[in-house]
Amino acid sequence: MLALVAALVIDLSQQRLSAFDGGGRLLYVAPVSTGLAATPTPTGAFRVASRYALTSLTAPDYRIPNVPNVLCLGGGGLKADAVCIHPAPWQERAGERFGVRRSHGCIRTSSATARWLFERVAVGTPVRVQE
């Protein structure tokens, strides 16, 4: 049985995601790429509001089809599906490392991290995004 994640913390200053179990024990740590200064990732207390095994990511200036293992945040005043934790295979293919701010506000991860999270994170899981 896979260990279920009870909480996620996204640290913007360190560009790091940490996953914890119900006892507060650290299960997983990974670098992420969050929002640029012009398109910042919002801070606050959120929850995983939706999970998509495969979806398209869209904004006024882009559309990326067939992105797997996407977790979108809700609560805290967020518009539905506006901020998601998702893989960025285009970033991986370009050889651009994670741990650097690069996104339009979402929380980008490696494909391996997105898969690990998708297998263990349920709708309703708390997510804290902090500076």
Image (cartoon, rainbow, N blue to C red):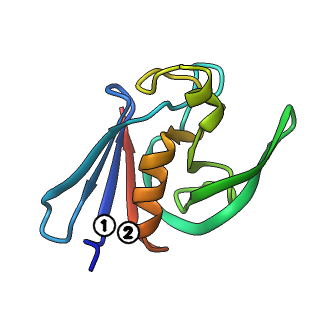
Quadrant where the image shows the C terminus: top left
| Disc 2 target residue | 120
Q: Furthest-right residue in view?
A: 60
Query: Which is nearer the eye, 110 or 99?
Result: 110
Dots 1, 2 in contact, CB < 8 A: yes
Q: Which amino acid type corresponds to the residue marked 1 in the rendered image?
A: Val
| Disc 1 target residue | 5
> What residue is drawn where x is 57% and y is 48%?
86
- Label 2 environment density (alpha carbons within 10 Å; few <14, some 14–19, many ≥20): few
Say which element carries label 2.
Answer: helix
**Residue 103 picture location, percent across and down:** 61, 29
> Horizontally, is 79 left or right of 22 in the view?
right
> Horizontally, is 50 left or right of 128 in the view?
right
Query: Which is nearer the eye, 5 or 92?
Result: 92
Q: How many numbered marks appear?
A: 2
Query: Which is nearer the eye, 56 or 127?
Result: 56
**Residue 76 picture location, percent across and down:** 52, 57
> What residue is drawn where x is 40% and y is 58%?
116
Say which element carries label 1.
Answer: loop
> What residue is drawn where x is 73% and y is 59%?
55
Mark closer to the chain start, 1 or 2: 1
**Residue 32 picture location, percent across and down:** 43, 34
